[in-house]
Amino acid sequence: MTPRLDDAVELLDRSLAYASATLTGVSTVDLDRPTPCQRWSLGSLLAHMDDSLDAFLEAADGVVAVTPPAPAPDRVGTLREKACALLGAWVGPRPGEVLVGDAAVASGVLVTAAALEITVHGWDVAEATGSPRRVPAELAAGLLDAAGALVDARDRGVRFGPARAVPGDAPPDVRLLAFLGRRGVVNVT
């Protein structure tokens, strides 16, 4: 089932608020810290987030160009500005589909993918800075079904680690993060 664009934008709004909160206090001294994303420092993760926000912003106009991110002296400030622009870009009337390379992707799917990526990387930032912040239960619950539809075996070992086993009655944030292969969430209570 393709997510409705309005529902996806609402998830995006909550994911941006969560990720923005995790960026509080990040400074240049933190940029070399390791993250839950293997082989990525916090600086690399923030650059990836910057590039992703650029792509999701471009998608609001119907086409995503594949270009590397420009260097940003204040990556956290840049991310906050782009987050505001991203939400604003998707609030008004938008195309039903977005061209990503040669593939047409339903806008609701793309915005839901943005919300998922932003949320998970927000959690990664919080973990990397030693300031754990749980994903709000309602946001995690809204992303769980989408994660199952958006992440498949081809993503494992590339974009996500193997899914981790957690009890079926675990909170939604624990189930979401474990599904996406994040370590350290099994013992969260």
Image (cartoon, grey):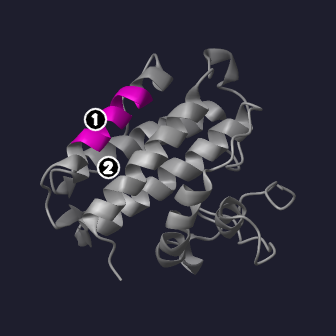
Horizontal arrangement in the rendering, residue 120 relative to residue 49 (left or right): right
Query: Residue 164's spot in the image, x, y percent?
Result: 77, 70
Label 2 amino acid? Phe
**Distance between the Cα atoms at labels 2 and 1?**
10 Å
Query: Which residue is rendered at x = 62% and y = 63% of the image?
Result: 160
181 or 44, which lies in front?
A: 181
103 or 57, which lies in front?
A: 57
Query: Which residue is rendered at x = 50% and y = 65% of the image?
Result: 142
User: Outermost residue toward the bottom?
Assistant: 1
100 or 173, which lies in front?
A: 173
Does the magenta run of residues contain 86? yes
Label 1 amino acid? Ala
Residue 49 seen in the figure: yes
Query: Residue 141's spot in the image, x, y percent?
Result: 56, 65
Does the magenta run of residues contain 71? no
**Highlighted range, magenta:** 79-88
Q: Which mark is residue 121?
A: none
**Compared with residue 188, is residue 158 higher up or lower down, i.e. above or below?**
below
Q: Which mark is residue 85?
A: 1
Horizontal arrangement in the rendering, residue 75 relative to residue 132 (left or right): left
Horizontal arrangement in the rendering, residue 40 relative to residue 85 (left or right): right
Q: Magenta: predominant secondary structure element?
A: helix
Q: Residue 56 carries which label?
A: 2
Considering the numbered disc 2 on the image, is that residue within a helix, a strand or a loop? helix
**Comparing marks 2 and 1, which lies closer to the viewer?**
1
